[in-house]
Structure formats: C-alpha cells, structure tokens
Amino acid sequence: MSSLVLALLVLATAPQNSARPSAEGFVDLVEQEILPLLVSLERANWLQDTYICPDSQAGASEALGRLLEFVARKSIEAKSFSGDDIPGDVARKLKLLRISALVSDPQAAPADGVRRREMTDLFSEMEGMYGVGKYCSEREGGICRDLVEITEVLASSRDWDQLLDLWQGWHDVAAPMGPKYARYVELANEGAREIGFSDMGDMWKSGYDMTPDEFEKETDRLWKQVSPLYQDLHCYTRAKLAERYGEERVPLGGPIPAHILGNMWAQEWNNLFNVLAPDQGTAIDIDALLKAKGYDPIKMVKTAEGFFSSLGLPELPATFWERSMFVKPRDREVVCHASAWDVDWVDDLRIKMCIQITGEDFTTIHHELGHNYYQRAYAGLPVLFRNSANDGFHEALGDTIALSVTPSYMVQIGLLDELPPDSLNPLMARALDKVAFLPFGLLIDRWRWGVFSGKITPDKYTSAWWALRLKYQGVAPSVERTDQRFDPGAKYHIPANVPYTRYFLATILQFQFHRALCKAAGHKGPLHECSIYGNKEAGRRLNEMMAMGLSRPWPEALKALSGETRMDATAMLDYFGPLHKWLKKQNKGRECGW
C-alpha cells in the first residue's frame, strides 16, 4: 500500500470533530517540522561529499527520502488552502513549499515509499559514481587520473592527441550512469505529477515568480541580448586555434572541437588566455603571484573573507575554519566540486573545496563565500523564506564580489606591487570565463527540460546533447559520440540533478548588480575597472538585498539593490564594450558563425 493511500485512509477514519488548522497554523507547523529534516539532509550530504563510501551514500539517500516524503505530503495538504482571505506571506509560503524552494536542488519524489527510496538511492549512487570516477589512459601507459588531475592537464597541455584521449576517457566514465539516469527521470516525473506539475522541468521553471512559458521566453530574451558578443568571441577564438592546430582540424566557419578549449566541457575558456591575450607579454600571472607571496589555501580564504569585512559585514564564525574542507584529503575519496554550506540553517557556515594555488580558485573562493554571507543574511527569516530571491541571485552574489577582484584590488591587498599598464588583457581573461560560459549555462537545462518532458528519449540522450551544444555553443566532438554513451553525465550537475539555468541568470545578474553597486560607490570610469572593496555603502545595499531572502518576489529584491525590476544584460555589454569593439576589428573579413 502506498504511503499516499495510507495517509488518505488515516484521514478518512480520523475523528470528524478535530479542528482543521488555519493556513497560518499549517505553514507554522510545516516550518517547525521541516527544519530538522533540512539540517539532517545537510549533515548527511556533507558526510557523503567529504567521505564517499556506501554508508555515507546510504545515509544521504535516507535523509533525502525523509525530506522529499515530507515535502510531497505537505504539498498535497497545502492544496486544500485557497482563497483571498489567506495573507500574502502565507500564500507565498504555500507556493514555495509546493515547488520545494528550500531544497537547494529541488526534486519531487513518488509518494510510494519503495519507489521514493529507489529514486534517492539512484541519486546518491550516481553522485558517488561521479565522485570516484577515474580514467586510466592506455596511451600513457595506464596512468590513472581523477577529474581534478585530468582538469590540470586540459588546462595546460596543447597536445591535440593527449587532450582528445583524456577528454574521451572522462566522457566514457559516465556511460554506466545512462540507464540509472533514465530511471531517475521516470521516478522524479512521477513525483512532480503527484503534486500538480506536468514534469520536473515544469516544476523547476515555476520557481521564478512567473509561469514556466514566461520563464523560457525570458531566458530567450536575455540570450538574444548577449549572443552577438559570444559569437564574436567564438569567431576570434576559433581563428587563433586554427592557427595553432591547422584549419583541417579547426575549420573556419565550423564548430570548435570541444576538447581543445582548456576545459572538460568547453564551458569556460580561461585556460586559453595565453593563446588569446590581446597584449601578448603583458599578462598578470596570478598563479605565480599567489605562490610568490606565500599564499596557501587558508590565506586565500582569509583574503576573501577580508573583502566582505571591508564592506562592513561581520567575520565568519570560528566553526567555519574548524569544519570546512579546504584541501583534498589524502586518505579518502571526496567530491572536489566547490560548494558553500549552511549546515544548521543558522550559522554553521562552511565551504568544501580542493583548493589549488591558482587565480581561478582565488576567484572561486570569493564566489563561495558570497553564498555563505547570503545564507547568514537571511538566517533570521521564517524557515520557508531562507533562500535567495531566486536561485540565480545566490550564484550571482558571489560572482558580483569576484568582479571586484581587479588589478586595483590586488594592489590594495598587496598581491600586486603596482598597477599594470592599460591593457585589454583583464577584460579578455574575464570574457573567457563569463562570456564563453553563457550558452553552456543556457543549454544544460534546455536539454533537461526536453528529457523531463519526454521530447528527448533515453535512446537520444547523447545526440540531443550534442545538437544543443552545436546550436548554442558552436562546439562539437572530434570523435563520434553515439547514443550508447551518456555524455551529459560527464558534467557533475546532471547526475547530481542540480538545476543549471541559475548559472546563466547569475552571469547576467552579476553585471547588473556590479553596475548598481559601483554607481552607489561613486565609481567613475570604465565599469570593468571598478572594485567595491572597502565601500560601506555598497555593502549596505548588498546586505539589504540579501536580508530579504525569499520573502518577496525577486523583482523587489533586484529593486532594493539596483533600482531596477527587470533582468537586463546591458550591464554585461557595457562591461565588455571595449573588448567587443576590439573583437569586431579582429574579426573583420572572417566568416563568423557555424
């Protein structure tokens, strides 16, 4: 007998004189009961990610199952409350409960306990498979590498055959996940339909204070604003790579081979900076500077904390330094993918990273601490409001701070001795990170929306994946990828079921936030030269927005920080304006597009 049927039988046989709680009483009780479940899940997930083993995976699966069962049950009960007499904040809580807004990676699970456990077990199993994945290269005499080690090679090597071998090897690691993922989709959709959504994609798209159709159109509008900038960056990059590898391997007018862009998923191209820098020989080597100045992982994190302190925000709690994972342990497998945590939903703040002494990780740390400061800012709100205004805001917050990691900031903290000469190099470095990412940030969930809706069936998972990557990114594999593979599973966020459009939105929003904060700080001059480091007024505005949490629709939170109520990519275009003008000049006479 399913748990849903059992619950209905219990209701049918309950004493009829029991008073039905008010909507206010219902959400108050939900908040009391859900907090221990959320904390239990955070603790179990922390253990699973920092000590991968069957026991930690089982614990995470059980904790997730308990939370999903509770949310599904309460979502069904919440349907009975409707009408104009429900206060606005209570109505908002009922809606947020239904879309699982408190779960960092919203999921729906079947009411049936057996199938719900099957789903959560699949989830934990796939994430574990990803975390322990390794590729052993026959070409290199059987050397085995995990993703961190492969990533280091992809970042530095320019050997076509070595890059292709490692790229193909890691993608093949994902193949066994394919059938598990297909079953996971079936079960997640079953849970979504039980609480009133057509599928999981419909549920995800409902979390933005607009209809799912409106949300799709909104992301299309934003992509249309920025796609000309991306296309010019793609055109320039392809031409430079054709010079290096030859037009027979990198044909002009076609897609770029995915394995030569310095990143496993071609999602950021910053590792190609030395090839693409406008002013060769004048680049700032942040990696070398950090090492020369004696930075270790703790000093990198302390420096990032100092940025937030300079804005007037309090220091991180002592437990942050005691409980975070800053480096990869030598004695066990862990998930190195960087993440920020608030384990007790109050002030048990942590980050989990395998920090390398690199400029990329230096920036990532600023980003992850942004999550922590956001978490602390809304910790005093009712439980159902303890999240960002939408999931793009959470990601954008830390990246907004990272945009202030400028040469002038590095001089202020002593990492640089003096400002370098004027150059487009810092803008190019940022564009290879941000602009290059835009289409990838969009297409991941375009693929999943198709999977959840049934438009993309399991026998077409990989071919549909590459069709979208060609359409949006203009990249393609250099070897045939068949549907017997499961190439989407080579990206962490697919087996971990992490919604991804948030990162696309965050890339747009961070520049909008940055422009508004720079204006509040009184910055004069090009937007890309602005750092809000040390400005208390910028910190005040930032904290005002963060403290709203999820209590109000996101346009109101955006207005609190920027005075605007619509997401707008013109700030990003302003930021990269000088570089875009230069790219157009470089591309004159070239055949752009693919």
Image (tube, rainbow, N blue to C red):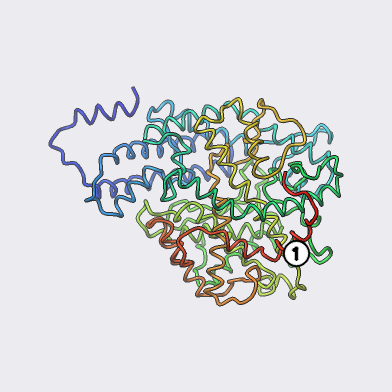
- Which residue is nearer to you in this view: 555 or 403? 555
Q: Residue at x 79, y 50 (%)?
A: 156
Above or below, 67 relative to 372: above
Which quadrant holds residue 407?
bottom right
The N terminus lies in quadrant:
top left
Name which residue type carries label 1: Asn
Q: Is residue 14 above or below residue 350?
A: above
x then y, percent, for residue 115: 44, 26
Of the 4 image quadrants, the one containing the C terminus is top right
Q: Residue furthest left?
A: 17
Mark count: 1
Q: Which one is in front, 470 or 287?
A: 470
The residue tagged with tag 1: helix, strand or loop?
Answer: helix
In this picture, residue 148 sits left or right of residue 555: right
Categorize mark 1 by other alpha carbons within 10 Å: few (<14), some (14-19), many (20+).
many
Q: Is residue 537 left or right of residue 233?
A: left
Please name the residue shown 35% across and 25% down the image: 2
Q: Residue shown at 45%/29% (left/top)?
A: 117
Q: Which residue is mark 1?
A: 425
* Coordinates of residue 39 in the picture (x, y in percent): 43, 47
From the viewer's perspective, is 417 left or right of 328? Answer: right
Q: Against 472, is 524 above or below?
A: below
Residue 511, given in percent of the width and then of the height, sits at 58, 62
Which quadrant holds residue 143? top right
Q: In front here: 569 or 25?
A: 569
**At which x and y percent is residue 239?**
81, 50
| Residue that lies at the very extreme toward the front in this rendered image | 589
